[in-house]
Image (cartoon, helix red, strand yellow):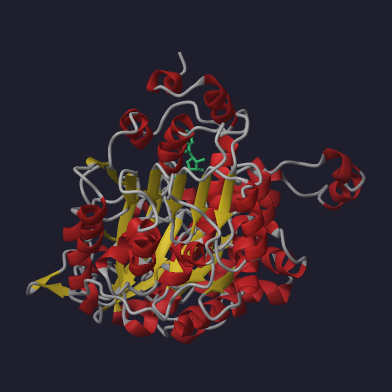
């Protein structure tokens, strides 16, 4: 039997949700539906967005209301226009095989006349943002005297946005005997207080441990010097070629600055903040939802209610002022059972804030290392290799060009061809990152040197300190069948320096690093002068010296692409649906909901005073 039928949902609803791909209830649906179906309890559900809570309350509402009657019986209050439209749309989808179900979305920033007309025609379920709802109540255009159920969705966000008073006023127009169902991602005192105020012995359901947030989210932090933050951020992005992320900043100005810098550097990014008009925000959100934007740079307020599936990373470019906001931010990833990463880029002084968030969430964060320039190169190289391997060939279109292409490469071996093809991208990355400095800042915590401190180097022949040794790059690695021992032998043979004086050796794929005493650098350079390995010139370069902070902080390699008309450049010039965007939307990763118009909310109340727990 279909598990939703077992939970007590009737066939016409189950058929509709099956078409949406709901085969099994999510944990919150499994636990809350039987309770809510009794219709006799107040209810508090502590659940993140993306856990399936819309259906958790939407399906019971459809079971419990009398659709022969055409007056408001359920009121769903939510913080943003986007969420309002989404809930309305979801409930319409769940009920599409039922007769005479009328759901209306009431939210700011759209024609009130339209909404009034829909209400007048007869409606059983009203989904609303508080401000516009109150406006309509004040016009005496709606009668809530027969409301049986009130749902307060994302209650913590509604309170964050200063809607407490509006909610009080709205609820005062509903009957005392109605049942109230409250959903919230976090349970700060303010939410506890309204639960107490509006509810009588509510049934409480906590998904996971209180405040732990979504278990599918991995939390990582990177410690960098303030001046390296932007470069470090870009490296993290470059190290994740398929990133589809939301980047949080603390202020509108920072949001705009970062977005502008990224765009200038050739990244596929845009900003979302309260100074944009509704139309501008809608446009940005549309591009992001359609995956023609890869990075959305947002303030906390502007990003409230954003509900886009498949967000791979949330990046806290600046940590939020309140612990609760961290949960909201990270909850934008790992939705609908997927996994996601929440990254914080901090300076050493902010470690205390991380520890505080860890304590609140009851979760340990992973201290991660900013990847080296060469790690990025390797990652990007293999990303290209995988893309080439998996690309869908348009046989018909390419057919006519094949003879000319074959002619061009007729004298080239398969190996040589692959090497050259991969080098097109790889050289560009290598060039950009070849002298990229280490961006990780060392940190002392509780008087103890952090165990990941870079000062603690080398497994073998550990260097006496970073200044006494120089780290060198060599363009040979494991693909040339070198392990550390072989490479050591090769270096000594070539340069005649003693094996004992060689420091840490780090063999990567197509390149490696090794350390030698500063005074031996010249000897190494001389030893490799004109050297070839299997017919290939051997290249030695000093790594991490003559730092290119400015280069990396400023124009990025993607910017270079643009100038050279590389693939990302091409993508940008073509307008929307670029290389990545096209790729993503073709992969069918888009929103499963039909007509899933998830627009942004009415103008956010960034000006409202907030009384929140601060670090
Ligand atoms: P929500 O938390 O209600 O916003 O839901 C998050 C996402 O999960 C939405 O895209 C829903 O369509 C999807 N979803 C909800 N319930 C289920 C289910 N039982 N099976 C599969 N997907 C679901």
The quadrant the C terminus occupies is bottom left
74 up-or-down from 371: above or below? above
Q: Is residue 445 left or right of residue 117?
A: left
- Furthest toward the top, the residue is 1
Quadrant containing the N terminus is top left
The residue sitting at 17% across, 72% down in the picture is 352
Q: How many discs appear?
A: 0
* 306, 585: nearer the viewer: 306
Question: Which one is nearer the viewer's eye here, 256 or 198?
Answer: 198
- In this picture, residue 276 sits left or right of residue 375: right
Q: Position of residue 14 (x, y in %)?
A: 52, 24
Quarter-wise, where is residue 155 in the image? bottom left
In the displayed structure, 225 sits above or below 154; it is below
Q: Residue at point 80% right, 49% down?
A: 411
Q: Residue at x 43, y 45 (%)?
A: 147
Q: Please determine whether, in this image, residue 190 is positioned above or below residue 592.
A: below
């Amino acid at each position: 039997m279909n598990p939703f039928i077992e939970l007590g949902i009737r066939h016409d609803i189950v058929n509709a949700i099956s078409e949406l791909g709901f085969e099994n209830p999510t944990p919150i649906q499994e636990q809350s539906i039987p309770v809510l179906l009794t219709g006799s309890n107040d209810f508090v559900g502590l659940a993140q967005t993306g856990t399936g809570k819309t259906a958790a309350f939407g399906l019971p509402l459809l079971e419990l209301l009398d659709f022969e009657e055409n007056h408001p019986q359920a009121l769903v209050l939510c913080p943003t226009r986007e969420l309002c439209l989404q809930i309305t749309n979801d409930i319409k989808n769940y009920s599409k095989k039922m007769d005479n179900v009328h759901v209306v979305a009431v939210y700011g920033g759209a024609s009130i006349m339209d909404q009034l007309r829909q209400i007048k025609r007869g409606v059983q379920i009203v989904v609303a943002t508080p401000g516009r709802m109150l406006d309509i109540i004040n016009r005496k255009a709606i009668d809530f005297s027969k409301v049986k159920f009130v749902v307060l969705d994302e209650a913590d966000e509604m309170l964050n946005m200063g809607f407490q008073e509006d909610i009080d006023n709205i609820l005062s127009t509903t009957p005392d005997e109605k049942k109230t169902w409250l959903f919230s991602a976090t349970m700060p005192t303010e939410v506890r207080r309204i639960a107490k105020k509006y509810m009588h012995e509510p049934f409480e359901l906590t998904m996971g441990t209180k405040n732990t947030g979504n278990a599918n989210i991995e939390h990582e932090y990177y410690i960098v010097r303030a001046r390296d933050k932007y470069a470090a951020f870009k490296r993290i992005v470059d190290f994740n070629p398929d990133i589809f992320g939301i980047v949080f900043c603390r202020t509108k100005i920072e949001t705009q600055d970062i977005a502008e810098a990224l765009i200038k550097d050739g990244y596929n990014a845009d900003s979302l903040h309260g100074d944009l008009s509704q139309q501008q925000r809608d446009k940005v959100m549309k591009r992001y939802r359609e995956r023609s934007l890869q990075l959305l740079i947002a303030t906390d307020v502007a990003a409230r209610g954003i509900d886009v599936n498949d967000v791979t990373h949330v990046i806290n470019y600046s940590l939020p002022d309140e612990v609760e906001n961290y949960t909201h931010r990270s909850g934008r990833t790992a939705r609908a059972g997927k996994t996601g990463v929440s990254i914080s880029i901090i300076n050493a002084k902010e470690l205390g804030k991380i520890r505080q968030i860890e304590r609140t969430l009851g979760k340990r964060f992973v201290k991660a290392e900013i990847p080296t320039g060469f790690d990025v190169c390797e990652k990007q190289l293999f990303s290209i290799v995988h893309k080439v391997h998996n690309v869908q060939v348009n046989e018909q279109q390419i057919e006519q060009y094949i003879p000319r292409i074959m002619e061009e490469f007729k004298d080239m071996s398969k190996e040589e061809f692959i090497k050259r093809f991969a080098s097109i991208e790889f050289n560009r990355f290598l060039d950009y990152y070849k002298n990229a400095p280490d961006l990780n800042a060392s940190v002392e915590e509780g008087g103890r040197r952090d165990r990941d401190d870079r000062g603690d180097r080398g497994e073998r022949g550990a260097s006496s300190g970073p200044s006494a040794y120089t780290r060198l790059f060599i363009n040979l690695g494991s693909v040339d069948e070198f392990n550390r021992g072989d490479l050591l032998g090769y270096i000594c043979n070539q340069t005649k320096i003693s094996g004992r004086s060689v420091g840490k050796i780090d063999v990567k794929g197509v390149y490696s690093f090794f350390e030698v005493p500063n005074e031996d650098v010249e000897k190494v350079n001389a030893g490799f002068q004109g050297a070839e390995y299997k017919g290939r010139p051997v290249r030695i370069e000093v790594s991490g010296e003559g730092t290119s902070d400015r280069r990396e902080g400023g124009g990025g390699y993607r910017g270079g692409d643009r100038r050279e008309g590389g693939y990302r450049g091409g993508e940008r010039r073509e307008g929307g649906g670029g290389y990545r965007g096209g790729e993503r939307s073709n992969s069918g990763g888009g929103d499963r909901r039909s007509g899933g118009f998830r627009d942004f909310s009415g103008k956010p109340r960034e000006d409202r005073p907030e009384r929140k727990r601060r670090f």
